[in-house]
Image (tube, rainbow, N blue to C red):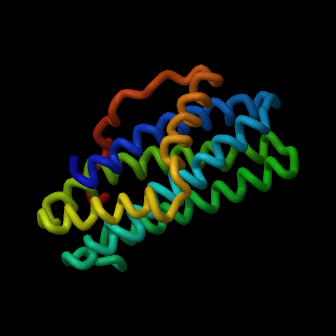
Amino acid sequence: MTPTDVLKQEHRVIEQVLACLAVLADRADAGRLDPGDARQAIDFLQVFADRCHHAKEENVLFPRMEARGFSRERGPTGVMLHEHELGRQAIRAMLAALDASSPAGFARPARAYVALLREHIAKEDHCLFPMADQALTARDQEDLQRAFDAVEHQDLPPGTHERYVRLAHDLAARLGVQPLAPAAAPTHACGT
């Protein structure tokens, strides 16, 4: 399994929580937001999606791709970094809405986050990761895997990954979200 395969597997778990977040946004529009479920979804997004998954991309994969000639300023890694930051802004807005007990205020950034991350994941799975796999050497792949392991076992408390995968499945079960099929190809060409 390549490092990009690991990231794709993590995307499937993130997509499950995005489906949960969409359900929560629909319920919030109907005035029935469960703050406990919403905070669990946000906790997952902050820890699993950001501190675990995005950390592997931002601190390991993207720098290696840039070392192999990809431009941060005018290239795909810069776009991905910008989208990660837009996601963080949406999460802050969701938290502010929860703190203000504003279901409508929660639904807007929740929907924006879901749309952003679904498109972002499609770009990575179908454009960025194939580019990375083509550009990176076998040695690069080995180095990336070791660095990914360090994120999992040194940068985060033991069992974090597994705990958040369980949280994603439990949240999906409570909200009636079915497991997702593998991601479809994007509706746009890479680079657009």
In front here: 8 or 91?
Answer: 8
**Residue 112, x across and y down, in percent:** 59, 48
Q: Residue at x 55, y 41 (%)?
A: 163
In front here: 49 or 124?
Answer: 49
Residue 176 falls left or right of residue 34: left
Residue 53 falls left or right of residue 109: left
Instruction: Locate residue 77: give its quadrant.
Output: bottom left
**Residue 177, x across and y down, in percent:** 55, 24
Q: Residue at x 63, y 24 (%)?
A: 175
In front here: 105 or 35?
Answer: 35
**Residue 115, x across and y down, in percent:** 52, 45
Examine the rendered structure and indicate whether residue 80 appears above or below residue 111: below
Q: Which residue is drawn at 27% across and 54% down?
A: 3
Q: Which residue is drawn at 63% across and 30% down?
A: 23
* Number of numbered tags placed on the structure image: 0
Residue 184 falls left or right of residue 84: left
Furthest residue toward front: 158
**Residue 36, x across and y down, in percent:** 76, 37
Residue 91 falls left or right of residue 178: right
Q: In which quarter of the image is the C terminus?
A: bottom left
